[in-house]
Amino acid sequence: MHAQAADFYGKFVDTVVEARGTREAETAKLLENTYRHVNIALVNEMAKFCHELGIDLWDVIAMAKTKPFGFQAFYPGPGVGGHCIPIDPNYLSYNVRAKLGYPFRFVELAQEINGSMPTYVAQRIQNILNEDAKAVSGAKVLLLGVTYKPDIADQRESPAVPLAKRLRSLGAEVQFHDPHVERWTAEGLNLDRVADLDAALAAADVAVVVQGHAEYDGEKIAASARRVLDTRGMAPHAGSVEHL
């Protein structure tokens, strides 16, 4: 059966990798997604204390990845999204606990850290506004990019949703721009999409780069916005820009 399946897929796939069985094949997928989940959580945790210590984590990662082996670069962000990373590791953790009776501690800790990032980003936005003697209530916050991945329209499990909900609960006036999304509803919250990005950047009290779409020019964002919180490392270092 394995040989027949390999022959079939070999007709249109360049490299066919054969697993010992279906359980191993599915667990390989779970392992790969869990590996990313855990490593993203690692750099997200580092982002928090590097900010407090005045260390540029993005430069740290750039230096670390010059090592020719033993390091794979992962980057911080406002949370994890999509149909794999937020879901598959939790499915694996649930099954380990349900069938074996003990926790998969790496996954549970990674979920706790990554799940906390939208709230952390909202707090950073509050801090930026405080530096300008502005309350978050009534402040104009512009979210740039609301999909879970760059350069696509897929919004499944996007961390932009809990971020928008948190900001709205604090009283902020939240708008969004996304070249791939015309209408966006954050779990019941209908948010206004801005058509004129330049005007919206100029009008916002703070612009937040949530997703790093290729259409976004980091230098232009930094030059146009009053204040920027860049969660994706796109904008250059400038007095108006903070990085995650």
Image (cartoon, grey):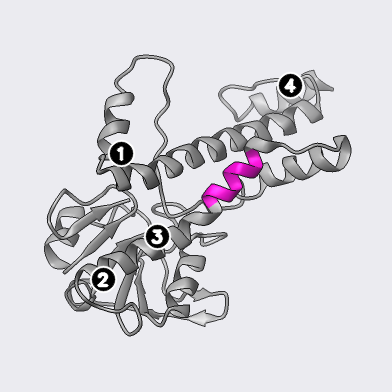
Identify the residue at image location x=16%, y=74%: 202
Mark 3 vs mark 4: give the one in front: 3
- Among all residues in the image, which is located at the extreme front? 53
- Of the residues under marks 1 and 4, which one precedes in the sequence? 4
Residue assigned mark 1: 57
Identify the residue at image location x=20%, y=79%: 203
Element carrying mark 3:
helix
The prevailing secondary structure element of the residues shown in magenta is: helix
CA gap between label 2 and label 4 equals: 55 Å
Residue assigned mark 4: 19
Where does the magenta region start and end? 107-114
Q: Which mark is residue 121?
A: 3
Packing grade of label 1 (10 A; few <14, some 14-19, many >=20) is: many
Identify the residue at image location x=76%, y=26%: 24
Element carrying mark 2:
helix
- Of the residues under marks 2 and 4, which one precedes in the sequence? 4
CA gap between label 2 and label 1 equals: 23 Å
Q: Are marks 1 and 4 in contact (CB under 8 Å)?
A: no
CA gap between label 3 and label 1 equals: 16 Å
- Residue 153 seen by the camera: no
1 vs 126: above or below: above
Amino acid type, mark 1:
Leu
The quarter in which the N terminus is drawn is top right
Mark 2 vs mark 4: give the one in front: 2
CA gap between label 2 and label 3 equals: 14 Å
**Residue 215 shown in magenta:** no
Q: How far across and down, in percent of the image, does residue 124 sit?
A: 34, 61
